[in-house]
Amino acid sequence: SQQGEEDPQALSIQEGENATMNCSYKTSINNLQWYRQNSGRGLVHLILIRSNEREKHSGRLRVTLDTSKKSSSLLITASRAADTASYFCATDAKNDYKLSFGAGTTVTVRA
Amino acid sequence: NAGVMQNPRHLVRRRGQEARLRCSPVKGHSHVYWYRQLPEEGLKFMVYLQKENIIDESGMPKERFSAEFPKEGPSILRIQQVVRGDSAAYFCASSPGQTDGELFFGEGSRLTVL
């Protein structure tokens, strides 16, 4: 089934640094989304990028999408301690209607 | 502006008992999705429902698991005769239509089977 795979599995950075994580997927998609999950909580939608888009920004977030490589990246600039969370990419394949999630990247921002 | 409400947040059951998890979607949303998350893993799709209809249950085990989304009331995920392997966090999400945009997630129901 369609599923994203995030890389790296875990990331530890100093406050103020940038955090970059990647997502690869297997088949053609309608769109790709990124979600954040704080420990013990539900998922919160961060950003959606459509298959015909290459880059999108939202505040300190920058997402890129390369459909030829079937990959996406999420960049968090000027990280804060509050950015400590797990980040998941999710894809919905063409002709499908459910989101498939990767295993996530756990980001720890050290103060 | 209530989001997706799930209850109970925590549920402890002994092997062989039944677990019933409830999900009230965002007001006006008619599409509900259930996902399961094991520790340190991503979310695995279980079932997709619209009001009174199961659209896709391909991710749900054939036995012991059932889901419904009645015309009135919350969506229910029911697990009969629970086993230790059912211990997980179960998340409900809703959307106003078929997934073409974001899903709105609840805080999850954490099931522990003793």
Image (tube, helix red, strand yellow):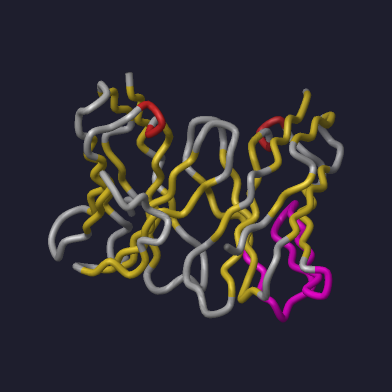
Quarter-of-image position of residue A59:
bottom right
Which corner quadrant holds the N terminus of chain B? bottom left
- x, y (%) of residue B22? 24, 45
For the record, the magenta segment spans A48-69
Give the residue drawn at x 68%, y 71%.
A27
Please tell me whether residue B53 belongs to the stretch shown in magenta: no
Specify the farthest residue to the front. B63
B27 lies above or below B43: below
Number of labels in the image equals: 0
Q: Nearer the viewer, residue A110 or A93?
A: A93
Q: Quadrant of the C terminus of chain B?
A: top left
The one of A84 and B20 positioned closer to us in this rendering:
B20
- Examine the structure image and report whether residue A57 is included in the region drawn in magenta: yes
Q: Please indicate whether residue A62 sits to the left or right of residue B16 in the image.
A: right
Image-quadrant location for residue A109: top right
Please indicate whether residue B1 sits to the left or right of residue B20 in the image. right
In-image side of A50 versus A54 (left or right): left
The relative height of residue B69 versus residue A110 in the rendered view (above or below) is below
At which x and y percent is residue A20? 82, 47
* B70 w.r.t. B74: above or below: below
Q: Nearer the viewer, residue A37 or B51?
A: B51
Residue at the spot 78% in from the left edge and 39% down from the top edge: A79
- Residue B92: horizontal and vertical position, in percent? 37, 50
Decide if residue B52 is on the left or right side of residue A58.
left
Residue at (14% x, 65% y) in the render: B71
**Going 35% across and 30% down the picture, which residue do you hit?**
B111
Furthest-top residue in this view: B114
